[in-house]
Image (spheres, coloured by chain):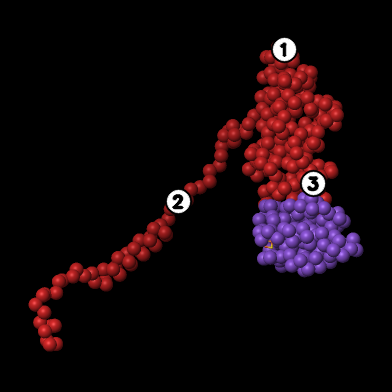
């Protein structure tokens, strides 16, 4: 009986076999290739300096005052000048701190400020949650938090968000709301250090167009031509 | 550069870049690890310390500007408000994981030093910059009211 198993009439089918050596060789070859691939010297992409000319183009410029000399009508010229100044006034760098509520906005998208903060009695925050809890006298690169010695909100009478440029114009010319006469208004625009921050905001923040000096020249020309407001 | 900073009543000489956040100095150099690193960008409040009595986020405080200030961390905060807050925190079993709590406590103490009887609104405003991943907000608010009650000499 036992012998019958050995004398099976069916010949065993020959199976195709791969020996262990080729597999080992393939694996070794793959490892060697991987090591060569990883260690092969490659030139990494290098940072390129941005040409100064290109940088200048990236900065939004303000039109020089002389550009407006061609407008013969004084009132029209004054309004055109204010519209140019409005590019600064309506930039997020200015608008974010002229909110119509008690809370500032932030970023170029002007989204609500996080953490949630409130203007408080002096515009610089509530007790125990002051602006100075986080904001210092200078922009701070390590945390990305902007800063200025005067960091605070504009008074609520000077809310700009949601207003037309004409409304903003009439508002800043109204001493009851701006708390400034025209001379003080001009000084505020050209000399105030918190206003100046709009052109050096640090981080990824887009600066206000032009420079504070260019802006000051436009404001001066606007006031000299009567300080007219758009509708 | 070398800076002498006044932390928890002691002068420490620190050799570091002036732009280093105070938080790193406290944790890495002085080993005062009670102050926590949550976000590093002034969004969570975990790193709050008192600078001349004012609550400040130490992650956004460069070493060079605190060299003349009195800094107090969770390890050394004291006084009636701190005691009242500690008792209320224990009684209410406020912390869950605890990570945010040193910042919460530093802000709560600062609030009670400025507002004796805070309303819910006062608490929410003062504590809005302190995030708690475990959402212990209701216990925090209740504990602050308890602590305020203790400070007023009432039992709540
Ligand atoms: S670590 Fe400083 S606020 Fe989050
Ligand atoms: S207790 Fe866990 S984050 Fe606040």
Q: Give the x, y percent position of residue A122.
A: 84, 42
Which label number is shown at residue A125? Answer: 3
Corner quadrant of residue A68: top right
Q: Residue at x 74, y 32 (%)?
A: A160
Residue furthest front as drawn: B156
Name the subunit of mark 2.
Answer: A
Q: Badges 2 and 1: C-beta atoms under 8 Å apart?
A: no
Q: Which chain is purple?
A: B
Q: Quadrant of the N terminus of chain B?
A: bottom right
Q: Quadrant of the C terminus of chain B?
A: bottom right
N-terminal of the two: label 2 or label 1?
A: 2
Q: Residue at x 75, y 26 (%)?
A: A167
Q: Is residue A18 visible?
A: yes
Residue under pointer 2: A43
Q: Badges 3 and 1: C-beta atoms under 8 Å apart?
A: no
Give the foreground label among 3 and 1.
3
Give the foreground label among 2 and 1.
1
Corner quadrant of residue B140: bottom right
- Report whether A209 appears left or right of B68: left
Q: CA distance from mark 3 to mark 1?
A: 45 Å
């Amino acid at each position: 009986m036992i012998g019958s198993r050995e004398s099976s009439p069916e010949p065993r089918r020959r199976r195709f076999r791969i020996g262990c050596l080729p597999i080992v060789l393939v694996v070794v070859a793959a490892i060697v290739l991987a090591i060569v691939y990883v260690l092969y010297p490659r030139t990494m992409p290098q940072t390129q300096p941005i040409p100064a000319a290109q940088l200048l183009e990236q900065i939004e410029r303000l039109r020089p005052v002389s550009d407006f000399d061609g407008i013969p009508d004084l009132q029209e010229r004054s309004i055109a000048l204010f519209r140019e100044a409005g590019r600064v006034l309506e930039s997020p760098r200015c608008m974010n701190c002229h909110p119509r509520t008690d809370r500032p906005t932030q970023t170029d998208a002007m989204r609500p400020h996080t953490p949630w903060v409130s203007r408080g009695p002096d515009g610089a925050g509530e007790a125990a949650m002051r602006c100075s809890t986080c904001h210092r006298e200078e922009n701070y690169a390590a945390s990305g938090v902007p800063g200025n010695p005067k960091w605070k909100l504009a008074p609520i009478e000077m809310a700009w968000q949601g207003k037309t440029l004409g409304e903003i114009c009439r508002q800043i010319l109204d001493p009851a709301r701006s708390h400034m006469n025209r001379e003080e208004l001009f000084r505020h625009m050209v000399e105030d250090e918190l206003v100046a921050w709009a052109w050096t905001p640090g981080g990824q923040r887009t600066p206000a167009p032009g420079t504070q000096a260019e802006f000051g020249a436009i404001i001066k020309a606007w006031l000299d031509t009567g300080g007219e407001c758009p509708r | 550069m070398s800076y002498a900073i006044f932390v928890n009543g002691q002068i420490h000489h620190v050799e570091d870049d002036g732009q280093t956040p105070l938080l790193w100095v406290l944790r890495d150099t002085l080993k005062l690890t009670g102050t926590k690193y949550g976000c590093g960008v002034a969004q969570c409040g975990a790193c709050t310390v008192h600078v001349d009595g004012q609550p400040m986020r130490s992650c956004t405080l460069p070493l060079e500007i605190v060299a003349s200030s009195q800094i107090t961390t969770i390890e050394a905060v004291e006084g009636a408000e701190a005691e009242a807050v500690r008792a209320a925190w224990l009684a209410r079993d406020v912390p869950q994981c605890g990570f945010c709590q040193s910042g919460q406590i530093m802000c709560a103490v600062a609030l009670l030093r400025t507002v004796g009887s805070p309303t819910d609104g006062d608490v929410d405003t003062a504590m809005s910059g302190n995030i708690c991943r475990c959402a212990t907000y209701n216990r925090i608010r209740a504990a602050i009211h308890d602590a305020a009650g203790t400070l007023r000499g009432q039992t709540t």
